[in-house]
Structure formats: C-alpha cells, structure tokens
Amino acid sequence: MPTPSKSQLDLLLGMEFYVTSTSGIGGAIKSRLEDFIVEERLRALLKPKHGGYVAALIEKRGIDTFTAARRVARALQVPLDWVSFAGLKDSSAVARQYLSIKGVEASAVQGLSVSGVRVLKVFPFDSPLSPSMVEANSFTVTLRRVELPVDEALSLTRLTMSQLLGHGGPPNYYGYQRFGSRRPNTHLVGRLILEERFKEAVEEFVFHPYPWESEAAKKARESGSVDEALRLMPKSLAYERSVLRYLQRHPGDYEGALKTLPVRLVRLMVEAYQAYLFNKALSERLRRLERFSEPIEGDYVMTLEGSWRVKGARGLEEARSQVRSRRGVVAMPLPSRELAKSSPHPFLEEALKKEGLELASLPSPRSPWPRLKPGLRPVAAQLKHPLILRVVEASEGVELTLHFALPRGCYATSLLREVVKPVDPVSSGF
C-alpha cells in the first residue's frame, strides 16, 4: 500500500502518496548550487550542420531556463523567440543544457558569458531545438543536514532505492518546480487563463502573496495598487513587472497585460493545470492499485515504435509481457477535451469528478490562448543507474550524494521526495 504524504504542499499539487514504505531520511537539498547538478543528454550527439542556427551547450547557475534564454538573446541582440531550448531545467541548480540561436554566427556565441550563463561549446546547426531531442537527464544531488547515523541513512536510502527499482521508478508526478514551491500557483493561473477569467489570473499571478516567498515580494503584492506594486516589486520578478507596467498604461486591460508575457510562459502555466490534473489521477491510481506501474484494462502502453491501448485479456497479457521485459511502459492520458470521444480512463475520470470537472466540459479558450493538448505520460519515472556516491559525517549532520538518470519530462524531486519524505518541502530545499 502507498504511504500518504503529510506535506500540505504535496496535497495542494496532487502528489498525495509515496510508493515506498520506508521512513524518510530527512535533510535538505539545494543548500548550495553545487548540491544539485543536472546534465541534459540528447538522443543523438548533435553534429555541426550549416543552416542558419547555432547550437550551444551552456552552463547556467541559479537561474531558470527562460531567464537564461532571455539573457543570451539580449547579449546577442536577437529577438527572444530566436532562442530555443529542448528542456526546462531547475533554477536552484547548476544545469548544463543546449540552446539554439537563429541568425547568428558561431563566433559570436563562442565564449559568451553573461550573468548566470556560460557558453561551453558551440557549432553551426540547421534547426531549432525541441523537447523530442532530449533522451534523459542525469542528476548528481547532495543532501545535507541528515539527522541520522551514517549507517542508518545509508541503509534507508538503499532500501528506498530498491523499492523504487521494484516499481520501475518513482511515481511520475509533475514535480514542485512545475508549479512553483515558494509560489505554488502556476496551475491556478493556468486554469483561470483557460476559463478566460483574465482579471483573476492577473490577481493570482501578481497580487496573491504566499508565505514562502521573500518579504519584499510579499510587501509589493500586498500593496493594493498597480503603481505601488510596481514601485516595490523586486527587479528580479521581471514578468510581474511587465504585467504591472502594461496595467499602468492600460488600466483594466487584464487580457492585454497577460499578453505581455512570453508565449512559452503562458503555455507553461496552462500545461501546469493539466499537470495538476494528471497528478490527481496518478494519486488515484496509487490509492487503488497495489502495483501502480503494472498495466490494467484501459491503460496505454508506450514503446519505441508508438503507443497502444490495452483491451481484452489478450491485450492485457501482451502489455504485461512488454512492461516486464522493459520493451514498453504503462502510461495514462493527459486530460483534454479530445479524450471525451474515447472510452474513459478510470483514474482520470475519478480525479476530474473530485475536481467537479468532466472531460467534455474542460475549458477551451478562444485563440490565441493555449489549450489543453492530448498526450500520454508514463505512470512511473524509469529510474536508471542509481548510485550512492558518498555518505559522510559532517559538522551539521550526515551528507549523502546520489547519482541517477531519468527520462526527459521526469522530475528528480519525484525520486528525492521518496528518499527524504519532507513534511515541509520548501524548508527542505524542494
């Protein structure tokens, strides 16, 4: 049986369970930037191709991928939408990932260094990067301040990893950074945009304070007026300031204010709402199945050749064979109105019902706002090459370093929360 989470943040984001039965070792991640290192691994090594683009391997430190792209675009004096990336990487980390830039020469990018971003390697390329180019991400993560003896911390971590491997990996929840841990409202803004409630979306995005953010940000959000909020809003909150500047010039035009945000960011917020609904459906699956990563009637199976739906006893046996031989993985659909045309998926329908929703009535805004797109997501994040690199006694408790790899779209925190089991993820660095 799964272990219920005791974290209020987990429950807010739909991550209601742990699949492991072990006690958490506690401690904190991301005490220092170097405690969380992520490296993007592409499906095939990019080879130089002349075609109007430059591909660049960058190292970013302490900033999100959107900010890194914006700073690179500004330094090269090109439009932001000429800079593409394959995947989003955590801001509180050292991350090595690829960007592509349109309309520049490799010599202009070589050796570029701006605040928080350093270019490591460049070569000419013939197209923008896309998420499908990423195969996996590898992580090296150090936990600090573990208040357990070394032997106990090591034993618990090994047992947790063993249980996770028995399931093929941790539950493939969308992680905290998909929603924001200090401001866990990305999905709330996304739902309001989908429902075309633009004034409420702006109020949630700009003016709603959360207890985990900085005092300066909270003071600005609580100020009660556009002018005062803009005066007080920290310079680092560039997107909030963009919305506020527009409202200064165009009072009451909340839809226009949201259009000042990058299209990719708005899409990210809409997709965050879809991610929240998926998390709720996955929690239903864990609640009701003893072996959550094994197929049942109505599931989908994803293979290298494509995907198919499990129907009938023969289909179920074939699905079990593919999953056990690691030729396929069990997947659930992402909620979208298009799914209403097919036979329902039990866990998704149940999760939507608890939210007061039905597939056929999911909001679908008019153009140009993004919509919920159909898709499939594996129920388990396939864990690869887990290693415990280091366990030592330090001045503030035990330090433990883990290394592992997960497929693209999977979150390291889906594994780390199983090891730590934090009651307060924010204070634990999540």
Image: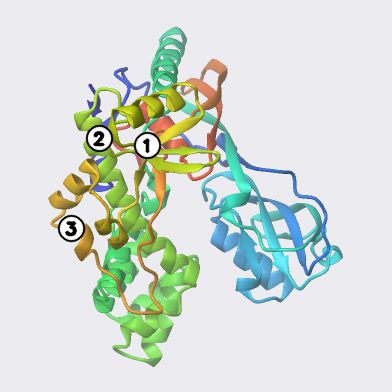
Q: CA distance from mark 3 to mark 1?
A: 21 Å
Q: Is residue 331 left or right of residue 410?
A: left
Residue sticking out furthest to the right? 107
Q: Are marks 3 and 2 in contact (CB under 8 Å)?
A: no
Residue 355 against residue 84 in the figure, above or below: above
- Disc 2 marks which residue? 285
Give the amino acid type for the residue marked by disc 3 in the picture: Glu
**Contact (CB < 8 A) between labels 1 and 2?**
yes
Q: Is residue 212 visible?
A: no
Q: Which mark is residue 358?
A: 3
For marks 3 and 1 on the same chain, the one whose residue lies earlier in the sequence:
3
Q: Choose the circle earlier in sequence order: 1 or 2.
A: 2
Q: Which label sits on residue 207?
A: none
Residue ID for mark 1:
379
User: Mark 3: few, some, or many residues within 10 Å (few <14, many ≥20)?
Assistant: some
Instruction: Please state which amino acid type lies under the numbered disc 2.
Output: Arg
Q: CA distance from mark 3 to mark 2?
A: 18 Å
Q: Which of the pair 365/265 is nearer the observer?
A: 365
SS for callout 1: loop
Q: Secondary structure at mark 3?
A: loop
Q: Residue at x 13, y 49 (%)?
A: 354
Name the residue rendered at 68%, 65% in the picture.
72
Q: Is residue 38 above or below residue 105?
A: above
The percent position of residue 206, horizontal first and vertical second, equals: 33, 70
Alpha carbons under labels 1 and 2: distance apart:
9 Å
User: At 48% across and 72% down in the image, what residue appears?
Assistant: 263
| The C terminus: image quadrant | top left
